[in-house]
Amino acid sequence: MYFVKKNDEKKNNSNFLDDFNNFFTGGLLSRNLKTDIEQTDKEYKVMVDVPGVDKKDINVSFEDNTLTISVNQCNEKEDNNKNYLRKERSCVSMSRSFYLENGDENAIKAKLDNGVLNITVGKVENAPEPKKSISID
């Protein structure tokens, strides 16, 4: 439950109760990129929840078999002329990385559809054999 004070003073800092409420209702726990990864013989299918995020605020990169998804979003510019009772929307920066063995950097497609980022990463057909362990005499 949130409480609003009945005074007109602007308050720029939050108190402990606000921080506690934000942690469980929309703060640190909900600000990660929830991801599902499906693997087939030919590709990886990565589905990432990014509700309300514009594709211009999303960066997808692939290097050394590691897929990295980053979001940098600012919902609203700071306006000092407004008298907010509560201001929870702010700039958010998140990033997740996933190792995708034998991923083909030349066979990657990404599409944003209804708040879900769908990424397909093809697999290299002639992947090198995994290194075997060598015992020491």
Image (cartoon, grey):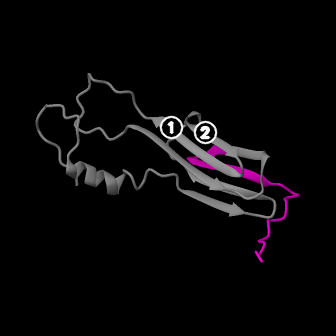
* Sequence-first tag of 2 and 1: 2
Q: At 78% from the left edge and 72% from the top edge, which residue is drawn? A: 134
Quadrant for residue 30, please give it: bottom left
Task: State if disc 1 and disc 2 touch (CB < 8 Å).
Answer: yes
Circle 2 residue: 59
Picture residue at 71% right of the left edge, 49% below the top:
64
- In the rendering, at what x and y percent does residue 87 appear? 29, 38
Q: Quadrant of the C terminus?
A: bottom right
**The disc labelled 1 sits on which kind of residue?**
Asn
- Looking at the rendered structure, the secondary structure element under dot 2 is strand
Q: Gap in Å between the C-alphas at discs 2 and 1?
A: 8 Å
Compared to residue 137, the image places residue 122 above or below, namely above
For this rendering, which residue is in front, 128 or 27? 128
* Rendered image: mark on residue 72: 1
Looking at the rendered structure, the kind of residue marked 2 is: Asn
Direction left: furthest residue? 7
Q: Is residue 38 above or below residue 33?
A: below
Q: Quadrant of the N terminus?
A: bottom left
Rendered position, 55 above or below 115 = above
Q: Is residue 99 left or right of residue 2?
A: right
Left or right: 88 with respect to 131? Answer: left
Residue reaching furthest bottom? Answer: 137
Would residue 109 be found to the left or right of residue 15 on screen? right
Tag 2: Cα neighbours inside 10 Å, few (<14), some, or many (≥20)?
few
Q: Which residues are magenta?
A: 111-137
Residue 61 place in picture, x, y as percent: 66, 42
